[in-house]
Amino acid sequence: VASIGSSFGDRNNITAAKIWLEEYNTEAEKVRPEAQEASWTWNTNITDYNNRLKLEAEKKKSEFDKRSYNQTLNWDWKNFTEINAKRQFYKIADIGESVLPTDKFQQITKAKSNMQSVYSKARVCNKPGDQDPSKCYPLNPTLENIMAKSTDWKELAWAWEGWRNETGRKMPDDYEKFVELANEAAGMNGYTDNGDYWRSWYETENFEKQMEELFIGLKDLYKLLHAYARKKLKERFVGHPFPDSGQIPAHLLGNMWAQSWGNLFTLLAPYPGKPLDVTEMMREQNYTTRKMFDLSEKFFTDLGLDPMPPKFYNDSMLDKPEDGRDVVCHASAWDFYNRKDFRIKQCTQVTMDWLITTHHEMGHVQYFLQYKDQPVVFRRGANPGFHEAIGDVLALSVSTPKHLKKINLLRPNQNPDDEELQLNFLMNQALKKIAFIPFGYLIDQWRWKVFKGETKKDEYNEDWWNLRCKHQGVSPPVQRFNTDFDAGSKFHVPNNTPYIRYFVSYVIQFQFHKALCKEAGHNGPLHKCDIDQSTEAGNKLAAMMKLGSSKEWPDAMEAITGQRKMNVSDLIEYFAPLEDWLKKEVKNETLGWDDQCGRNFTIPTPPPTSPPTTPTPTPQSSTVKPTS
Ligand SMILES: CC(=O)N[C@@H](CC(=O)O)C(=O)NC[C@H](CC1(C(=O)N[C@@H](Cc2ccc(O)cc2)C(=O)O)CCCC1)C(=O)O
Ligand SMILES: [Zn+2]
């Protein structure tokens, strides 16, 4: 194709090239909305019929992408001097899996649809104590609530193991097929493998090294929190087996993946007598889903940012449907790339966690609104981590006792300036933000190795537990086998959504918070800052979001923070008061764990009968004392 001269005359005619870019945009604003609409229909009503329509629309979009890619070959765009036009061509030419020939494209979308369907339809039965063993439970809300509230080791282990049996264990073949075809597509696009392609979105030299350095910078803080949680959980579950090697059994941390420990707040709060029970306050005030969204929207508009378009509330799915249909409950925010349709789909519950999630999703929609007049290919975050950070930055202000008081979600007798309450608040934040760091880091460490071919299918689970044990310091509550596929029990793996973006977000959201607090004129400790109603802060955020992905992310970082690097210093500053408190609390504890775990936690093949269903204690690994 490259040999065909451009039909617009010479290959360097920038004027003609810009005309073509306009035509591409007009076409893309028709094709993408159709693909999004079909995907939305399936996500909000999982049926074979809607799946067929989704696959058909994805096929049509991939053909448009292929055609567009071929047309970019008519231009010598890599040598264009106009940066904006050159960058648009670069992104139009980056067509991902659409590069595959039709039959292989169908195969990869089928494999992904199979895994997404298994994940979204999964139910777990045989609940201990149930009269009717055939009664089955979904993740949202039942299993999540059990993981959040139960202190019964057996019940927690049932939910933890059952979820993995009903999801990950049914996926290895489809996942292997997906990896093979995603790597093939990446190769056709000039990348070494799919991980190389995913990392290319950060346009950052030695990106893996940079991520490792950020992670190393946060390890000590995590080890303090881990040691404290382990100490208190051993008290709660006295008599139950904790491995000598120092890990915490993964089902005890209040979350199905041990990725956020906020549900352990009542156990871990420095001053239990001063609760932050926002969920109870919301329920006492008869909060509804819509009230949660109105609250979030008001925070954005009080910063001078955009309100939701009128259609938003009509077209979104903000509650789990009650008509029994299967939906993808996992929250998500949708840009239809037609500058008019923006939606959120989530199965909202009235809790503080869901108020945070609502801000997170509204942050995505705000970014969509701010860059909606960019060319279609620039309607993305400066890098994927930026898109994940917006909602969380606002939530850092909303969560403060000062702000909770303002919106009447702090108990009337509680004083926001009470230093003990403030320390409880910091612990609550740490249980979500610091606890998350190793998890946010390790998912793509695992996937990058799979894409590189360093982890073969029969090592998927051993390598997963190697990383979970080494970086997160958790262990499986029941024996794991290489016929299990525990990575597949986490939404983003079957859904093929990259994850390092969340690790990046958790670092940069504190850099943004620091910069916006300064803009808002905040004085005093960073964790007490509430940027509410600061249009100066809002303007800075809006200016960055309007860029979309039209500039490389250091430009966007500079627009907010005045400097061009990611660093962990603001996160560490935010948690400094708690760090001091934790150091005292764990001075007699051994920090960390023995990270030579791999084989200890997975054995290659299951015994002749199916793996034990009743939880057996984690194997007492070698007597090696945990490293200090
Ligand atoms: C069409 C489409 O897919 N759109 C993208 C957005 C876009 O790319 O434009 C999208 O909506 N992705 C869904 C995903 C949902 C959530 C998630 O998965 N979160 C992570 C990690 C985490 C957890 C707590 C937290 O406070 C922040 C992050 C997890 O739950 O493990 C669920 C709850 C929060 C965010 C999301 O919103 O990022
Ligand atoms: Zn997000």
Image (cartoon, grey):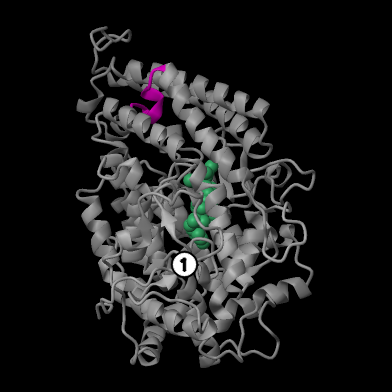
**Seen in the image, is 583 located left or right of residue 627?**
right
On the question of residue 206 being in view, the answer is yes
Residue 140 pos. (x, y %): 65, 55
Which residue occupies 69% across, 61% down?
Answer: 349
Depth check: give the residue in front, 237 or 32: 237
Depth check: give the residue in front, 64 or 470: 470
The residue segment tinted magenta is 92-101
On the question of residue 560 being in view, the answer is no
Quarter-wise, where is residue 621 in the image? bottom left
**Seen in the image, is 154 located left or right of residue 460?**
right
Q: Is residue 98 magenta?
A: yes
Which residue occupies 55% across, 58% down?
Answer: 613
Q: Quadrant of the C terminus?
A: bottom left
Residue 476 pos. (x, y %): 44, 64
Residue 51 pos. (x, y %): 61, 28
Q: Is residue 298 magenta?
A: no
Which residue occupies 26% across, 66% down?
Answer: 596
Mark 1 lies on residue? 250
Residue type of the residue flagged with mark 1? Ala
